[in-house]
Image (cartoon, helix red, strand yellow):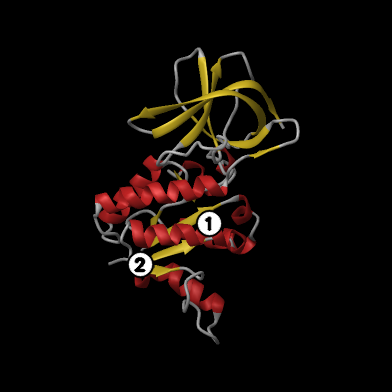
Amino acid sequence: MPKIFVSYSSKDEELVDRFLEFLMRGMGVSEDDIFCTRLAGTLPAGTDFLARIRTELRGNGIVIPLITPNYMKSEFCLMELGASWALSGDGGKRFYPVLAETMTYESMNHTPLKNIQMLRIDRRQDLGDLYDLLCEDKAARRRTSVFNQKLDVFMNDLAKRNDPGKDGDGYYHAIVADVRNVPENYRCYKINGRIDLGPGVTYQEGETHWIFYHKGMYPDLQPGDRIRFKVSRTELRNFPDLKNARNIYLDALERC
């Protein structure tokens, strides 16, 4: 069974802890088959840190970098990313980069990964694709019902971590996380996290929040844009690909 090397920034410890738990409890990956310095006992006292990292990068069959803004600012992370990319392909190491937080495909255009298929940590379909890949690699166990249950928990935890804040003028501040393909006369964008629905209202399993408006009412947006907006009303919808998605209809929207 191939081992998985998880590359991350030390400034993203909360995120990587949640991801590691999801790998183990949701995808059935054994802790013994993961190399990640966040796991206890990975680097015992007296270990030559750089030599161990080099050995694991060469030896492990799968590398999953969790790419965040902090990751891209770290020279050490970029070294791991470049080495993993160089060792991948042509029957070599499997390389599954995962974008998180405000990272977008466009933000990777200046890197060697611009032509590499990447996954997003906040997309259910992408995490399902990662699970399928790891099962094909025999690094994960096929337990679909357990995976779906833990996926809901992971997505909910991720959304709570990124919940938009509200300022004194009644504007929510958020980051555009994704663009949905809708009819030409409309615009629909996923925001990071979920807005506060008020007292007595509970989120549904896997609920995501999307701002929705007619073309021309507000500016067109892209993933990574920082915005602020006022809410007119919301409507919970259910789609086969998104599960529970809440449309947010606006009174105001502007870029920050």
- When asked about the image quadrant of residue 30, the answer is bottom left
Residue 130 can be seen in this image = yes
Helix, strand or loop at mark 2:
loop
**Which quarter shows the N terminus?**
bottom left
Which of 181 and 174 lies nearest the eye of the viewer?
Answer: 174
The residue that disc 2 covers is: 3
Helix, strand or loop at mark 1:
helix
Amino acid under label 1?
Leu
- When asked about the image quadrant of residue 228, the answer is top right
In the picture as drawn, the residue positioned furthest to the right comes out as: 168
Amino acid under label 2?
Lys
Q: Residues within 10 Å of mark 2 (few under 14, many from 20)?
A: many
Q: Is residue 42 above or below residue 115?
A: below
Give how far across and how far down residue 152 sits, in percent. 39, 46
Residue drawn where x is 63% and y is 55% of the image:
70
Q: Is residue 137 left or right of residue 244?
A: left
**Which quarter shows the C terminus?**
top right
Cα distance, mark 1 to mark 2?
21 Å
Residue drawn where x is 36% and y is 52% of the image:
150
Observer-side mark, 1 or 2, equals: 1
Q: Are marks 1 and 2 in contact (CB under 8 Å)?
A: no
Which of 57 and 70 lies nearest the eye of the viewer?
Answer: 70
Earlier residue among tags 1 and 2: 2
Residue 93 can be seen in this image = no
The residue that disc 1 covers is: 15
Q: Is residue 206 above or below residue 50?
A: above
- When asked about the image quadrant of residue 108, the answer is top right
Residue drawn where x is 42% and y is 38% of the image:
204
Which of 75 and 142 lies nearest the eye of the viewer?
Answer: 142
Residue drawn where x is 31% and y is 47% of the image:
148
Give how far across and how far down residue 173 sits, in percent. 66, 36
Give how far across and how far down residue 140 sits, in percent. 29, 59
